[in-house]
Image (cartoon, helix red, strand yellow):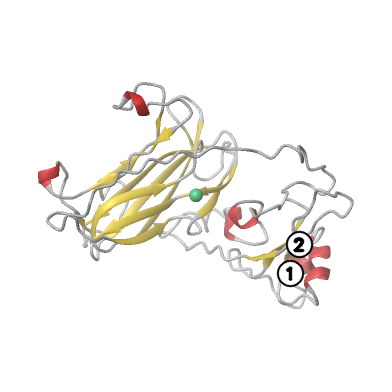
Amino acid sequence: MYPVIGMCSPSCPSLVSCVRSARTTLTSAAYPRRRSPAPFGSAKGSLQYVPVAAQKADVGSGTVGFNNACAPRPRSDLLEERNPTCDLRSYSGGQIACHHMWSLLDADQEIPWVDQPLQYRLKFRFWVQPYNASFHTNVKRTTWGIASPVEYDVPRCADGVEGCSRAADGSWEHTIRGTYKGGGKLVAAHFHCHAPTCTSMAMYTCAADVSVCNATTGRLICKEEPVYGGVGKIDLPGFDEPGFILQPPCLWGDAAYGLEAPVDVDGLMLHSVKTSKANYGHHGEMAWQQMYFV
Ligand SMILES: [Cu+2]
């Protein structure tokens, strides 16, 4: 928990008094005794940044609404697993708490390196073709998530933690699954997840008469795994760079261009499986499927 982040509910007399009490009694502050607590996953409220006045470098401010919503199985595993990201009362980090100048430290921790802004570098490559009406087609975009629905916490795995298993090399692996209805003829799947946690995402399609759609009853249509640069697994040597990761998408299209035909998933159930490294916990990991279809 980060004491600089508080939470509030509409039942509190004021945002400030609620946030103050929330530092020590989060649940009772959000839910007075006369009401029974909201079930896990349905608490309402927001996060407020409370700067530490004694630290000049602490200039963060603002309030952000909490809108994560984990659907019950089979849509997503996370609600039944009581993933902390599903509920405001258990939320302990992730994209909702990540804002400009919000220092996610304990209140008694000094903000380090205030004169050394962290720098990072992004490199983009764009392939561009002039429009050609004979083969370019407009596509539509949709997103399917199996987390909250976008982000979730990968727990630090141990014996007995749901979703945890040992990978082939003996390290901990955490897996979540979700089942949902598809739509359209798929032409591209970009599975969005985070380095260095994410190890794979896979999507299966099930026949309409299958009662339980999973990796056994379904047909694998796309699996994406990160390819690390600098280890000789990228075909173009100039792009095989250490420190970068290639995550090839799944693409469907015209056989004339070497592609398999678009997958028609209209009305079909789809099932996705996402695996992560879990020797350590990770906040704000994602299992977000960015899809293009016609
Ligand atoms: Cu992300």
Q: Residues within 10 Å of mark 1 (few under 14, many from 20)?
A: many
Q: Is there CB contact under 8 Å for labels 1 and 2?
A: yes
**Coordinates of residue 286 in the picture (x, y in percent):** 49, 49
Mark 1 secondary-structure assignment:
helix
Q: Given the image, on which type of amino acid does mark 2 rest?
A: Leu
Report the residue at 51% width, 61% height from top: 70
Quadrant that contains the C terminus: bottom left
Quick one: 238 or 36, which is closer to the camera?
Answer: 238
Disc 1/disc 2 C-alpha distance (Å) = 6 Å
Quick one: 200 or 128, which is closer to the camera?
Answer: 128
* Callout 1: CB less than 8 Å from ligand 1: no
From the viewer's perspective, is 125 left or right of 7? left
Report the residue at 28% width, 51% height from top: 188
Which mark, by number, is residue 30? 1
**Coordinates of residue 133 in the picture (x, y in percent):** 15, 58
**Coordinates of residue 175 in the picture (x, y in percent):** 45, 43
Quick one: 272 or 262, which is closer to the camera?
Answer: 262
Q: Given the image, on which type of amino acid does mark 1 rest?
A: Ala
Q: Which residue is mark 2?
A: 26
